[in-house]
Image (tube, grey):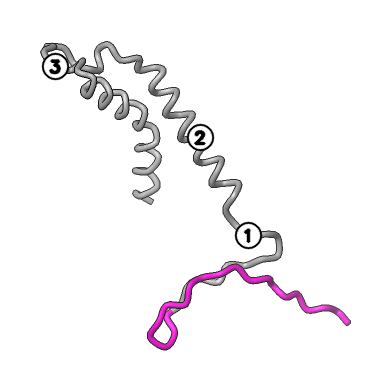
Amino acid sequence: MIRIVIENLLLLLLPTLLYVAFVYLVGGGKGKKQSVLDDAPLIWLFLTGVALAVSVLLFFGTISGGKPGQAYKPPEFRDGTVVPGELKINKVPSDG
């Protein structure tokens, strides 16, 4: 659970981290007594982070998972090796 929280916080803070890195690399952070974030467009950086986080969550939420009728078989340890997990089709017994 903590991994998910950290990943989402990183997505929210990524635009701000890139902005601070850019300002320092260009030289805007040298010789000034004030913080780099004093002149930063914090609202736009926050909104960009929210848009990035939402778009990543929507993207991975819509492309992951199996088709209807498939079930996930988790990886298992068999004969000294790890057999990877896979999606299998559930066979429904017929009435006939």
Residue extending farthest bottom: 79
Which residue type carries mark 3?
A: Lys
Q: Position of residue 27 (x, y in %)?
A: 19, 18
Give the magenta part as a residue range.
77-96
On-image quarter of the C terminus: bottom right
Q: Which residue is mark 1?
A: 66
Q: Position of residue 34 (x, y in %)?
A: 16, 12
Which residue corresponds to mark 2? 54
> Which label's residue is closer to the chain start, 2 or 1?
2
Which x, y percent locates residue 61?
A: 56, 46
Residue 53 drawn in magenta: no
Q: Is 2 or 62 nearer to us in this picture?
A: 62
According to the picture, the residue beneath numbered tag 3 turns out to be 30
Kindly state the secondary structure of the residue where label 3 is placed: loop
User: Is 66 placed left or right of 33 in the picture?
Assistant: right
Q: Which mark is residue 15?
A: none
At label 2, which amino acid type do we have?
Answer: Val
Residue at 56% across, 69% down = 86
Q: Earlier in the sequence, mark 3 or mark 2?
A: 3
* Residue at 57% over, 53% down: 64
Classify 10 Å Cα crowding around label 2: few (below 14), some (14-19), many (20 and above).
Answer: some
